[in-house]
Amino acid sequence: MSSSYFLKTFRIILFPLALLYWLIIAVRNFFYNARIFKSSSFGLPLVCVGNLSVGGTGKSPMVEYLVGLLKDKFPVATLSRGYKRKTKGYSLANQSTTALEIGDEPMLFHLKFPEIPVAVGEERLDAISQLLHDKPDTRVIILDDAFQHRAIKAGLNILLTDYNNLFTRDFYLPTGDLRDQKSSYKRAEIIVVTKCDPSLNQDERERITREIGPRAGQSVFFTSIKYGDIYHIHTKQKYQPADTTEVLLVTGIANPKPLMRMLEENYNGYSMLQYPDHHIFTIDDLKEIKKRLNQLTTEDKIVLTTEKDAVRLVKFDTQLTGLPLYVIPVRHDFLFGEEAKFNELVTSFIRNFRQSE
């Protein structure tokens, strides 16, 4: 019996717990919708990036995309929970910050955009106030993975759903992956269907849009994964593997399947070391990586990892010397020529914030 078959069977057995989970989140949403539970607003534009499910839908690349879009137009900051960090409470990244202190995704934002404030805090309501106290010039805050945190009312909600696991076809935890009601999609201003096939046609686009059923005023976009230039983890020098290159893929992300497909289509072969999402690498893991690399028979071989994983590996510093460890960036590529439309929706929301609030 395969492990995947066992997992699916086990999740079906947990169906009664899924119904209980649905009841809890339904009651919670009812209290917010009825304004028994209060949502707080702030006097500046808040852009929320989130989803209805657990697992990878591309939230981090979307936050990166938004930062790149906005940072030269507005004083922007990011606020995340800081998942699996070793600290608690509010923290603002600085020159000595590590991924253990703020989490891998915020650390990646900090490394890519050192000029913008990157903050973390479980209690986002308090964290926003502290961030504005520390960085009073901030005019836009991007909230990472905050769609279900209704104590804060964001002005622009961007909801992501994976093409291969649309929220419309999913079920609630622990039987499925949903952590919020399907009907919560109505609270979003923008819905992005991510990880689409780049060749997605117009008929399929219209079929999925009908399945989602956007309400009046909601915009639906479609993106595919686009991989950037591979670069060395330390030197940052770009690297173009040959067709004959054998790859050892090392990942600790929720959904490595798109990356696996890319390797299957482009390279001679690959093997894989897969760790849990947000895995904190140990020295024993590094030893295992080196051992597995040495077991590859070809001379033309590399270790390849994602940028999120790289921020958790770079701590080994000199112990990585001589290891051909390379990093591959991931970003959203808008389909149907609608990138400019998406950009305008986001920037116009910020420009017109004062008039619209």
Image (tube, rainbow, N blue to C red):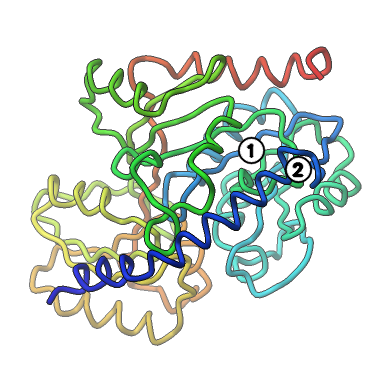
**In this picture, is 168 found above or below 220?**
below
Which mark is first along the chain, 2 or 1? 1
> Toward the viewer: 337 or 4?
4
The crowding category of the residue bearing disc 2, from other C-alpha atoms within 10 Å (few below 14, some 14 to 19, many at least 20), is many
The kind of secondary structure element at disc 1 is: strand
Please name the amino acid that badge 1 sits on.
Answer: Cys
Using the rendered view, name the quadrant where residue 78 is placed.
top right
- The residue beneath circle 1 is 48
Q: Position of residue 25 (x, y in %)?
A: 59, 53
Using the rendered image of the protein, determine whether residue 228 is visible from the camera's viewpoint: no
Between the residue at mark 1 and the residue at mark 2, the CA separation in whole angstroms equals 10 Å
Q: Which part of the image, by quadrant, shows the C terminus? A: top right
Q: Which residue is mark 2?
A: 152
Q: Residue at x 54, y 49 (%)?
A: 180
Residue flagged by tag 2: what amino acid is it? Answer: Ile
Instruction: Tell me which residue sits at (91%, 47%) in the image.
Output: 133
138 sits to left or right of 193: right
The quadrant in which the N terminus is found is bottom left
Q: Determine whether, in the image, residue 202 is placed left or right of residue 61.
A: left
Q: Relative to 39, is 62 on the left or the right?
A: left
The answer to whether residue 174 is above or below residue 129 is below
How would you rate the neighbour count of disc 1 (Cα within 10 Å): few for under 14, some for 14-19, many for 20 or more?
many
Q: Secondary structure at mark 2?
A: loop
Residue located 25% across and 15% down the image: 202
